[in-house]
Amino acid sequence: MATEMEELVSFLSSPSPQIRKAAVDIVRGLTGSVEGLQSLANYSNALLPALSRLLTLPKEVSEAAAEALVNLSQNSSLAEVMVRMGLVKTAMDVLYKPDCGIARLLVMLLVNLTQLEAGAASLLQTEDEKVLGLYVIKLVRSFCRTTHENNDDAFEHVGSILVNISKQRKGRELLLDPKRGLLKQIIRQFDSNSSLRKKGVSGTIRNCCFEAENQLQNLLLVSEFLWPALLLPVAGNKIYSEQDRSKMPLELGTALSIERELVNDPEIRIQALEAIYLIILQEAGRRAFWSVNGPRIVQIGYEDEEDPKVMEAYEQLGSLVNTCFISVHESPLNLYLLNIWLIICMHIIESMF
């Protein structure tokens, strides 16, 4: 004899719209608690396909089904089942239907699914070279075209998806492909007022910088946008002197000539410093960093920093600068960077007393 939960799941496939609606509303409610999630997980083989089919129905049903799937996908075991049953493809197909009214929820579902390696690979479409990256290109286009000035930014979570896929080499290679120009489009979203968009862009840049050894040239092709996105968050809030700004490209010098809001999220500042670190591991990256007066920006930013974890990231960068530039020749460049490193060391010593 069927249990109450089995009957509830079976009602999701009822031919009666009223019964389907009532059942999916109950399921959505159950997914809002730990106990409910655990109870539903035992019936995932029937539950997940039934909810997936409801995504194509009108919003009054599909919205509840999508919310339930988002909640269920926080369980990694259930997320694995969803990926295996092709829910990434289903979500993308529904997302780009002209009358889709649940875009935000579908994007959130994709965020959860792409946290799994298999989910990220599914979104990247790595198994078919003919369509490799097509889903990602669509999402980047939507991410860059939609407005972030209102409360209904359906695609702001795409930044988190980009962070997830850029943890894989295939993802990084796709984003760094100069013919596609995806990284340039993504970086420009760092100017957004949305902290979620900023964090997504920053994390994606940092991940892409893990390819600096082999793809530094492709990173530096977008220097006009890359350096402001990396250096402005760690530049502090001082107005820079004309002498300092004269050694910077226009896009940096102009931004640092006026008062500006600090990037409040310490994680973004840490990601920016880690990305710079990965870039200057390469000789050409160090030259590029120097060419925009990066060491001076890092020096001033460190003097203003108060967060211990961010200061640690500055110090790690300073240690690399010291190792890379000072050990070989006593050029003016090396002496200048040594001075920066000594300033950082002095700050560390002073903080101990």
Image (cartoon, rainbow, N blue to C red):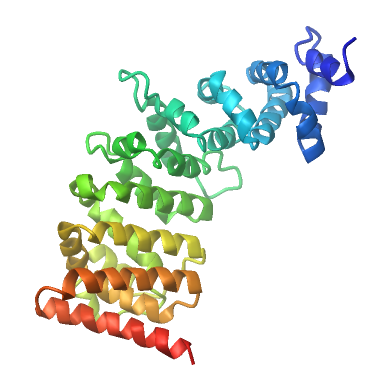
Front in this rendered view, residue 129 or 199 = 129
Residue 338 location in percent, x, y? 22, 81
Residue 52 location in percent, x, y? 64, 19
Q: Is residue 350 above or below residue 176?
A: below
Residue 337 location in percent, x, y? 21, 78
Q: Is residue 162 above or below residue 250?
A: above
Seen at 57% across and 48% down, the residue is: 150
349 left or right, relative to 342:
right
- Res 20 → quadrant: top right
User: Can the viewer see residue 224 in this picture?
Assistant: yes
Seen at 19% across and 57% down, the residue is: 282
- Res 234 → quadrant: bottom left
319 left or right, relative to 213:
right
Front in this rendered view, residue 10 or 59 = 10
Residue 333 location in percent, x, y? 14, 76
Quadrant (top left/top right/bottom left/bottom right) for the N terminus:
top right
Q: How many marks?
A: 0
Seen at 77% across and 33% down, the residue is: 38
Q: Is residue 54 above or below residue 343?
A: above
Seen at 18% across and 61% down, the residue is: 288
Residue lying at the far top of the rendered structure = 15
User: Can the viewer see residue 90 in this picture?
Assistant: no
Q: Is residue 78 above or below residue 215?
A: above
Residue lying at the far bottom of the rendered structure = 353
Front in this rendered view, residue 83 or 58 = 83
